[in-house]
Every structure is written in C-alpha cells, then in structure tokens.
Amino acid sequence: MPQFAAVTVDSVEMDGDGVRFRIRARAADAACSGCGRLSSRVHARYQRELSDLPVSGLRARVIAAIRRFKCLNPQCAQSTFSEQIPGLTTPFARRTPPLTGALVKVALSVAGRAGARLAAGLAMP
C-alpha cells in the first residue's frame, strides 16, 4: 500500500463491513500551508476519517491522527495549520487520492446509477 509510505500504522481492525487502519505521520515536523516554513511545534491533535481503496474486496477506512502545528513565521497570516500526509490526505477531503482517482475512472466510463452500483459492488461507495 504505497499511500502508507509516510505513516506508522498503529493498528488494523476488522469491523462489520470492512477494515479500519489507525495511522499517524512519521515526520516530526510539517510545512506551513501559508508560507512553507517547517514547524515542529504542535498546537493540537485531532482524528480524521478517510475512505481508501478496498482491501481484498473489503471497504477500507483510515483513521488518521492529525496534528495542528503553530507557524513560527511572525509574518505569516496562518497562525496554525494541519499537517498533510503525502499521498494520503488533501485539505478537507474525505477520501484518499487513490480512491478519488478510482472513482473518477468509474464515473468517466460508466457514470450515473450504473457507476454508483459498480462502485458499491467494488466496495467503493
């Protein structure tokens, strides 16, 4: 699973309809989304749930422990920012980029209700 290259997988759990991965970023710091300066000063933490590509025909969910960092640049308009994990998270998204790409391919080739049925059958609702 190449999207997990930059993370530590804390646990893998089976639930009723799929598998759940609990992950956290390996990096000690993150780049500010406003100015690009690296910061290692953690301001807060929260959990974010993302849908991912199916694993062995089972729906996959990723529970990411996300850190909010304080920007250390006094000229930056961003006082805090959330870390983004490359290949796994994008701002405000509820799906991973690989799942989004797969759903776009289904939508462009089949579209409509048939595409929705196909995606659900592939464990990508």
Image: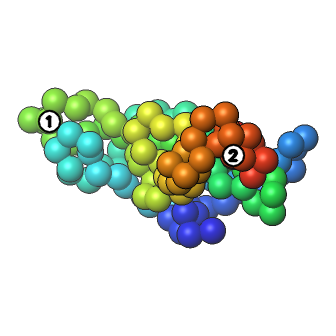
For the residues carrying marks 2 and 1, which lies nearer the camera in this image?
2
| Residue 18 shown left or right of residue 5 in the figure | right
Residue 17, how many percent across, how many down? 86, 43
Residue 51, how many percent across, how many down? 64, 44
Q: Is residue 4 above or below residue 102?
A: below
- Cα separation, mark 2 vs mark 1, equals 42 Å
Residue located at (72% from left, 47% from top): 118
> The N terminus appears in which quarter of the rendering?
bottom right
Q: Is residue 47 above or below residue 1?
A: above
Q: How is the image coloured?
A: rainbow
Residue located at (40% from left, 39% from top): 91
Mark 2 residue element: helix
Which residue is at the front of the view, 77 or 86? 86
Residue type, label 1: Cys
- Residue 87 appears in the rendering: yes
Number of numbered tags placed on the structure image: 2
Which residue is at the front of the view, 107 or 47? 107
Residue located at (25% from left, 30% from top): 79
- Residue 104 appears in the rendering: no
Question: If you read the primary sequence from the N terminus, does the residue marked by circle 2 or circle 1 appear first?
Answer: 1
Residue 94, how many percent across, how many down? 55, 37
Residue 40, how many percent across, how many down? 35, 50
Give neighbour class at mark 1: few <14, some 14-19, many 20+ (Cα, 10 Å): some
User: Which residue matches tag 2?
Assistant: 119
| Residue 69 shown left or right of residue 59 in the figure | left
Give neighbour class at mark 2: few <14, some 14-19, many 20+ (Cα, 10 Å): some
Residue type, label 2: Ala
